[in-house]
Amino acid sequence: MYKHAFAAAFITSILFALGFFVPYVGEALVLVGFAPLLIYLSKEQWSYKKSFFFFFFSGVLFFGITLIWMFSLLPLEWAGVESASIAYALFVSAWLLVVCSFALWWGVFGAGVAYLSIWMGSHSWNLKILYALSIAGLWVLCEYARSFVIGFWGFASGSSSFFSEWTLGSLVYGMTDGWVVLLASVGGIYLVNLVIIISNVLVFLWWSTASTKKKRVFGGAVILAGVMGVASLGGVFFVKWHERANRSARSYEVVAMRTDIPRAFVYAQSDRAASLRASIGHVVALPQAIDILVAPEDGDMLSFDALNGMRLIDRMKKNNTLLVDHVYTRQANGVESRTLYWRPDGGIVGFQGKHILMPIGEYVPLFVGSILSLLGYQHAVGTYEDARALAVAEKGPPVTDVRGTYASIVCSEASNPNMVRSLGKNGADVIFLQASDTLFRGNYLYARYMISMARVRAIESGRFVVRASNAGPTAIIDSVGHVRALRAGGSEGVAGQVPFLHIVTPYARWGAWPVPLAGVLLALGLLYRRYPQ
């Protein structure tokens, strides 16, 4: 019997994982992915241990598959670890820690499902609807708790917070080609998660009660089609709303650069000079007027161009182009990562800082530093901190200029929905996403993952997201999550008309309201479970 349980867990993980890496299939697969595991565990009389273990096991497989792109970080010579064997041992240990910590919350969810499921067998469909809602509430709370895992393991005093929200691994990122994801504009990824589990549980309930296999398959297909159909009808109205807003908004020609930097972690100017010159050459050769030019993280285009012929600056003077540059500045608390807004006729327009740093990528977490020190690698920690460690900067409000109000997020900040939400709520007309992807250069899985996150952030905020990268995908994404322009290779960027929108989505206005709603739904299920009379 255990082989059937492992098979069910494997099928669940594969269904979810396919949505991340195969276009257009994710929505349907995510909406039914848990059904095989639920069906099997119901036959096992909802054993707590089995439910916890097989949900945990399925989570390990799912996160292991969807986060496999992290192995692009190897080898770790960039972090001061020269021994290949030690580098692999350290990395695999850290990777497994993240994967298992994520999967732990799937296990907690599985145990909770078993607890709630014991009483549902012979009850009416009205109570089964309550059962589905309470399980969906449990899932949302587990996903919300899981979003703080990276903040927990990545904590370092002065560099991060225990309460940094990282939504890496959310099932929502596997369904960005569908309609259901548009619900993120109403309640963020947690509302979408609520719908995901309701759909899964309804399919499971129908499968468990239908008398024949034919009825099971037909009923499951009807439920799936119903969820997707209702979502598509709502999505049509949502898209029409945004189309009207786009027509009434002022649009500007925006160019996002792709500098095609070779794989490296710390650069000398000479290492990137040829790539930057080629990228600048493409911008200079564009025939259209450029209103805004967005450089990637670690761009420092202004300083480079000033020392290399000023071709870009001269081109910007023609249209008084706003440059959205990225620089590192030394402040009292250390070196900060900052977005610099600059215009030829007025100089510096404003700054915004990077407030959420990437663990290991931009600072050494307390846990990792302690392990390295115990292993005798104090010198590696010191070398890394001298060469790369950054200080947390204040994000600051959106920056207002003659053309509109702008906001930037830098690389890892894209995984934090609340940050992007607050920028849109505080008046930003457009979101610029500056990314450094050199260590993941050429990794298709990573590129698709990053674009999926950017698409969801665009939907949540109701704003165009312009992503500029030095080695990964450069794109213009509209306010309903459609990719208007994309370039994944070469030193040529993307260009397009970007409307500056002023609409406020329900999510931007009210935030993650599905999380407290999930608490209420779970409480109702627990109350009935405890006091069925």
Image: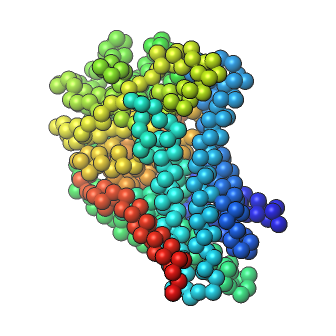
Q: Quadrant of residue 157?
A: top left
How many numbered badges does the structure rendering display? 0
Residue ID at (62%, 57%): 107
Q: Is residue 71 visible?
A: no
Q: Is residue 497 above or below residue 48?
A: above
Task: Provide residue 163's location: percent of width, then percent of height.
Answer: 41, 44
Way the structure is coloured: rainbow
Which quadrant, please, contains the N terminus?
bottom right
Residue ID at (55%, 86%): 125
Task: Provide residue 97's location: percent of width, then percent of height.
Answer: 62, 40
Task: Provide residue 209's location: percent of width, then percent of height.
Answer: 66, 84
Could you say which is closer to the camera, residue 217 or residue 189?
Answer: 189
Q: Is residue 233 above or below residue 466?
A: below
Q: Quadrant of residue 82?
A: top right
| In-image side of 466 versus 382 (left or right) | left
Residue ID at (67%, 65%): 48
Q: Is residue 347 above or below residue 162?
A: above
| In-image side of 295 versus 490 (left or right) | left
Q: Is residue 110 above or below residue 308?
A: below
